[in-house]
Image (cartoon, rainbow, N blue to C red):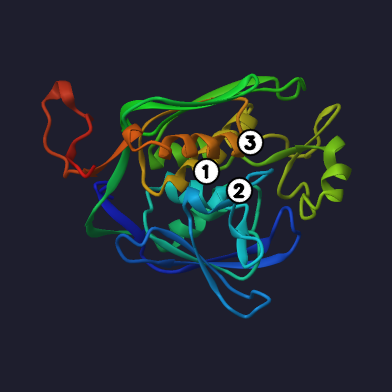
Amino acid sequence: MKQTHQITLASSTVVSGIGVHSGDSVKMALYPADADHGIVFLRTNLPNGVDRLIDARHMNVAATELCTVVGDRNTGAVATIEHLMATLSGLGVDNVLVEIDGPELPIVDGSAAPFVDAIDAVGLVATEAPRRALRIRRPVRVDAGKAFAELTPHDAPLRLDVEIDFADSAIGRQRWVHESHPRAFRRDIARARTFGFMRDVEHLWKAGFALGASLDNTVALSEDGVVNPEGLRFPDEFVRHKLLDAIGDLALAGHPILGAYRSYCGGHRLNFAVLEALFSDRANYELVELAPRREHAASNVGAPAFGNSLR
């Protein structure tokens, strides 16, 4: 699949399940979309009977507490979009209409793997339209106590370097570096599941979160370690899932990013904050058109080829 041209689905596909926070049953359908359509949510089954279109862009983010929410909670919003957004970004999909009849995407098994499987079942097609990307021109950084997130120039598909540091010995300090490529996403990131602590459950329930969480869709941790009888999918599944979330949140930039992302003890709030910082000044980035790849000399094999800046 040529990543220099925009990509969409070859056919529609459906994923159903419950929302991890709402506990509500939901049906989500993914449809092919035309070039330059982007990722757009069509929220149906609203109380007022009026469907709502919501662009999956950073300016439409309504909340980042425990999950990422786009839209307006009063007129129609969609929560927990990060796993699907990570899947679309990780597989290089540019244009999709996501029709959903509830307030939250299905959590399925807590990872992006079910979304990957659904898309693989129908396949992808390239359009004639060239792909555009955001090239980072100047470093941007957001700090929150010991935590930070930053985007820096790096003339290649997004490189992510994510580190977490938990006092709990079952997690501890973990780090994973990911070079964006569909094969690496499938192999290293897609199957990493969301996780939570048993000690937080009652507090989360009272706050209206985790109402649909179970051992079928969440890695649960007690004082003695992982509760799930099957254990972990990766020894460092926790940081891989944090990286998955970061891919999904950064996809709200609206275009693939040519740059490097680094975070320490980050999460949805910092992922979103660094996008806000990026877009706060037009000098921080430029929009470029990805040129068709040319034959390179042996010393330059794999080097990115860019067209003219659209800045």
Q: Amino acid at mark 2?
A: Thr
Question: Which numbered disc, 3 or 2, marks the residue that appears first in the sequence?
Answer: 2
Query: In the image, what residue occupies the spot 38% across and 53% down?
Result: 93
Q: Amino acid at mark 3?
A: Arg
**Element at label 1:** helix
Give the distance between the C-alpha atoms of the residues marked 1 and 3, in whole angstroms.
Answer: 23 Å
**Element at label 3:** loop
Residue 118, position as x, y percentages in the image: 50, 59
Question: Which numbered disc, 1 or 3, marks the residue that appears first in the sequence?
Answer: 3
Give the residue pinned by disc 1.
249
Residue 177, position as x, y percentages in the image: 48, 25
Give the residue pinned by disc 2.
68
Give the residue pinned by disc 3.
233
Q: Residue furthest bottom?
A: 49
Query: In the image, what residue occupies the spot 12% across and 30% down?
Result: 296
Image quarter of residue 18 = bottom right
Number of numbered markers: 3
Image quarter of residue 164 = top right
Residue 105 showing in the rendered view: no
Residue 75, position as x, y percentages in the image: 62, 68
